[in-house]
Image (cartoon, rainbow, N blue to C red):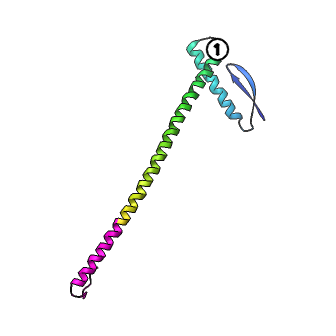
Amino acid sequence: MAEVSITINGRQFRMACEDGQEEHLMDLARELDARIGDLRERFGEVGDTRLTVMAALTVADELGEMSARLKRLEEELAGLRDAHVATADRTSITQTAIAATLTEAAERIESVTRRLNQTIGGGSVPLG
């Protein structure tokens, strides 16, 4: 376990974290400290505890909004996946129908060509 010294709202704290997470923890502390600083500028000196609670509530609010947004995006993604599957199924059916139609047309053309060859003098000048 690593230990990191962070400063939030002018106070130093010694925090433990997983090895390799030190910089991430320091970034989080800087973000929280900046939020508290912004709140202090907007509301003045309302007490350290109150500023910390206000900062925590703004973070919790953002987290809630992001969670709701993530849920909506996951639902939208699921809908898009379903639409993609349905489109792929329709495409496959259409391709099969086109292939069958082309095969049928080719067979009809070959049949007409055979009849024409038979009609034109016993096939001395074959068509196709």
Question: Is residue 101 found left or right of 51 in the rendered image?
Answer: left
Question: Is residue 44 found left or right of 93 in the rendered image?
Answer: right
Residue 3 placement (x, y as % from top left): 77, 31
Q: Does 125 lie within the magenta span?
A: yes
Magenta region, mostly helix, strand or loop? helix
Which residue: 74% across, 36% down? 18
Residue 17 placement (x, y as % from top left): 74, 33
Q: Does 124 lie within the magenta span?
A: yes
Is 112 in front, or is 45? Answer: 112
Residue 21 placement (x, y as % from top left): 71, 36
- The residue type indicated by label 1 comes to Arg
Residue 57: which quarter of the image?
A: top right
- Answer few, some or many: residues within 10 Å of disc 1's Cα (few below 14, many 20 plus, some between 14 and 19): few
Residue 25 placement (x, y as % from top left): 69, 31
Residue 114 against residue 44 in the figure, above or below: below
Q: Quadrant of the N terminus?
A: top right
Question: Is residue 125 found left or right of 58 in the rendered image?
Answer: left
Query: SS for tag 1?
Result: helix
Residue 42 against residue 80 in the figure, above or below: above
Which region is colored magenta? 101-128
Q: Which residue is mark 1?
A: 50
Which residue: 51% across, 37% down? 73
Which residue: 62% across, 27% down? 31
Q: Quadrant of the C terminus?
A: bottom left
Please count the marks in the image: 1
